[in-house]
Image (cartoon, grey):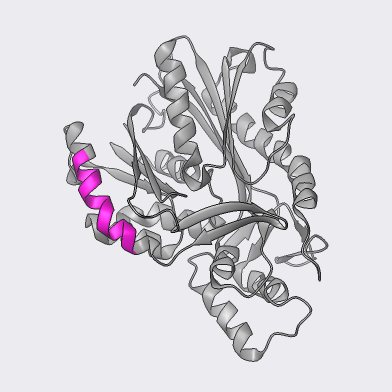
Amino acid sequence: MSLTIHGLGTALPPHRIAQGDAAAIAAEVALPNQVPSASQRRLLATLHRRSGVATRHSVLLEPTGTESCHQQSFFGATSPGTAERMRRYAQEAPTLALRAVLAALDQAQLPPERITHLITVSCTGFQAPGVDLSLMTALKLPADVARTHVGFMGCHGALNGLRVAAGFTGADPEACVLLCAVELCSLHLQYGWEAERIVANSLFADGAAALVACGKEPEAESPSAPRLRRLIASGSLLVPDSTEAMSWAIEDHGFAMGLSPRVPDLIAEHLRPWLTGWLAVHQLTLAAIGSWAVHPGGPRILSAVTEALGLDPLLIEPSRSVLRDCGNMSSPTLLFILERLRRSGARGPCLAMAFGPGLCVEVALLA
């Protein structure tokens, strides 16, 4: 594969909420028009505490005069319909995406007119014209930039986008690809006392990440340039008999996430045999991987990966820290982890991994 990452940028909404305060909001939507009992409030607080999340960001949050922020108007006694949620996506997603893109271009030290391909990734909102055309307008990209949208792929969407980018740069070494993943998961907070939805409500958050990738190495490489720049290979696995384990469906009141408690067991059973075989094709072993960027679908998923692969828990700490600080932002999350690894000078090769509806496993190998 001929792809080199020249720049990577991330962006979060300006306001955040502590997980304890989020549990209070969860009580309001889990039992709308009811007064939760003390035991129900304790259960919600426990689930939020065990989520591995300390703080999350959302485009729906407004300052309250303290360090904490609360949703003020979007979620009330009645669940907003999907159309209303999509109107908010159209209003907020382009601005957040642009912030991530500008950060990536700044790190790459490349002008927008150098971009030949634009890839957008999102599973939390759809509109046409969409985020892609908003970015073209804001950046004044050339009118002949080739646009591709990777939609509804879930948490591994950035890896799907990276594979598409590698196809472009592999076909044309002069290509320069801008990839942007933006998700507003908090728009899809689900009402009702259902275990899977309560767990999803405790994990998901908003964020955007972007990268600039070209078919060629930079002409003047800086000695301080981040590591983990070159994409070596990518792979994919559809886990057998797992189609009900993870789902993402458009419903009348937003997009509903289904997350079965079977997911960690499926990972434990199928991940190691497949991944060791895939690495062997590239003359590598699990022990040869220098750093890991594992998507933090939740603390149990991270534990399942750690145990299945026999990894030192310290290798998964970057994933846990992003989950703790930002929550699960779906597709941008993996790029947040990769950005932290690059900043810390983590050694390669790096194995990036994420899970999505199917149950599917997507991986990418970077050096």
For image coordinates 80% across by 67% down, the residue present is: 78
Quadrant where the N terminus sits is: top left
Q: Is residue 302 left or right of residue 84?
A: left
Magenta span: predominant SS is: helix
- Asked if residue 219 can be seen in this view, the reply is no
- Asked if residue 78 can be seen in this view, the reply is yes
Q: From this view, report whether residue 117 is shown above or below residue 193.
A: above
Q: From this view, report whether residue 361 is shown above or below residue 40.
A: above
For image coordinates 59% across by 72% down, the residue present is: 194
Residue 323: give x, y in percent of width and height.
49, 57
Quadrant where the C terminus sits is: top left
Q: Is residue 327 magenta?
A: no
Q: Which residues are magenta?
A: 265-277
Q: Is residue 41 left or right of residue 134?
A: left
Residue 24: give x, y in percent of width and height.
68, 75
Farthest residue in the bottom direction?
A: 38
For image coordinates 63% across by 30% down, the residue present is: 102
Residue 316: give x, y in percent of width and height.
35, 55
